[in-house]
Image (cartoon, rainbow, N blue to C red):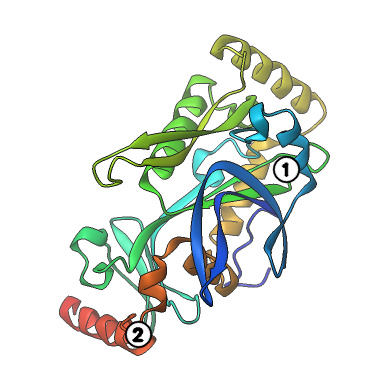
């Protein structure tokens, strides 16, 4: 296996609750109150919708896609949802610093180094919204491709916190049979003082409609037994995925970083002339390393 290349679940498409639009010659993020399922192909109008989007939307109330039936492909919650504090170079999309609140991997003039990660609120490099929580949820929508996933990317604390809690709770309640549970993504809204009382949408993970926890666990046990009898090893799959994620210091690539910059960073910060350039970030990194040393 090539060292330094993160082996991540195969991605068939994307799940989003917004899109990037062209306005005044700029690419600006635009929020939405429903899910959109897209392929990995773009045209001049943006990401091309996946056929599953139309299929699921046809049965949705008012054709507003606010629930999506999903299956996890791993039992380990941390393999399904990947989340870290991430600082990207806004010109190239390269990850510069990635941390978990305790330690971080950081690109410096000396190469990739490990440093304490005090979280964005206490880190000098993170000021001005440079560093954000960045979560990637991998889910299966197409049962004909057992290991193919659709990815939901977010920098929202509400989605990351809620998804992490649900995954860990369902994992514990089912005695580790997370990948066998009938689940769905659910779009929820809330208003806060920071949102000026306007609705903010985030993603939740629940049991499918009409299914109780007792029924879901019973179904999961039956499916688990059937898979074991067929010779399937879920523990082996989880371990292989764990090794694949750990094969590189940075899980994200440049292409993914550019998508994050387009979709999640405030457009004014990205496009104004006073945006922090690469060399300024590198200078701050050097100063930070000197202070640590």
Label 1 Cα crowd, 10 Å radius (few <14 / some 14-19 / many 20+): some
Residue 205 visible in this rendered orientation of the protein: yes
Looking at this rendering, what residue extends furthest in the front direction?
24
* Front residue of 167 and 231: 167
Q: Is residue 126 shown above or below 50?
A: below
Label 2 Cα crowd, 10 Å radius (few <14 / some 14-19 / many 20+): few
Q: Secondary structure at mark 2?
A: loop
The residue shown at (62%, 35%) is 64
Q: Is residue 126 shown above or below 217?
A: below
Q: How far apart are labels 1 and 2 at the CA level?
A: 38 Å
The residue shown at (66%, 53%) is 9
| Occupied quadrant, residue 66 | top right
Direction from residue 286 to residue 77 in the image, left or right: right
Direction from residue 207 to residue 134 in the image, left or right: left
Q: Position of residue 265 (x, y in %)?
A: 41, 65
Which quadrant of the figure contains the N terminus? bottom right
* Chain-order first, disc 1 or disc 2: 1
Direction from residue 114 to residue 215 in the image, left or right: right
Q: Secondary structure at mark 1?
A: helix
User: Which residue is denoted by mark 1 in the rendering?
Assistant: 53
* Front residue of 85 and 54: 54
Q: Position of residue 117 (x, y in %)?
A: 27, 62
Q: Is residue 204 shown above or below 229?
A: below
User: Which residue is denoted by mark 2 in the rendering?
Assistant: 273
Residue 118 visible in this rendered orientation of the protein: no
- Asked if marks 1 and 2 touch (Cβ < 8 Å), the reply is no
Q: Position of residue 67 (x, y in %)?
A: 60, 31
The residue shown at (49%, 44%) is 78
| Occupied quadrant, residue 141 | top right
* Front residue of 191 and 52: 191
The residue shown at (30%, 83%) is 274
Q: Position of residue 245 (x, y in %)?
A: 56, 58
């Amino acid at each position: 296996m090539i060292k330094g290349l993160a082996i991540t679940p195969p991605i068939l498409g994307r799940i989003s609750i917004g899109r990037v639009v062209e306005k005044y010659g700029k690419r600006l993020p635009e929020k939405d109150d429903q899910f959109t399922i897209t392929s990995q192909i773009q045209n001049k109008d943006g990401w091309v919708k996946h056929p599953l989007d139309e299929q699921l939307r046809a049965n949705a109330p008012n054709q507003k896609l606010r629930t999506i039936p999903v299956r996890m492909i791993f039992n380990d919650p941390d393999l399904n949802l990947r989340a870290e504090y991430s600082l990207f170079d806004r010109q190239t999309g390269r990850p510069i610093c990635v941390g978990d609140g305790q330690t971080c991997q950081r690109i410096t003039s000396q190469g990739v180094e490990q440093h304490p990660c005090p979280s964005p609120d206490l880190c000098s490099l993170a000021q001005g919204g440079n560093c954000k929580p960045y979560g990637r949820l991998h889910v299966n929508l197409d049962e004909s491709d057992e290991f193919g996933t659709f990815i939901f990317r977010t920098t929202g604390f509400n989605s990351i916190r809620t998804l992490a809690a649900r995954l860990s709770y369902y994992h514990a309640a089912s005695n580790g049979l997370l990948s066998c549970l009938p689940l769905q993504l659910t779009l929820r809204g809330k208003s806060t003082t920071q949102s000026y009382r306007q609705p903010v949408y985030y993603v939740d993970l629940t049991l499918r409609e009409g299914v109780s926890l007792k029924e879901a666990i019973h179904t999961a046990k039956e499916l688990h037994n059937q898979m074991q009898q067929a010779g399937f090893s879920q523990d082996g799959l989880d371990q292989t995925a764990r090794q694949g994620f750990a094969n590189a210091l940075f899980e994200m690539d440049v292409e993914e970083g550019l998508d994050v910059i387009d979709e999640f960073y405030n457009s004014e910060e990205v496009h104004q002339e006073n945006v922090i350039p690469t060399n300024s970030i590198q200078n701050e990194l050097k100063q930070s390393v000197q202070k640590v040393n």
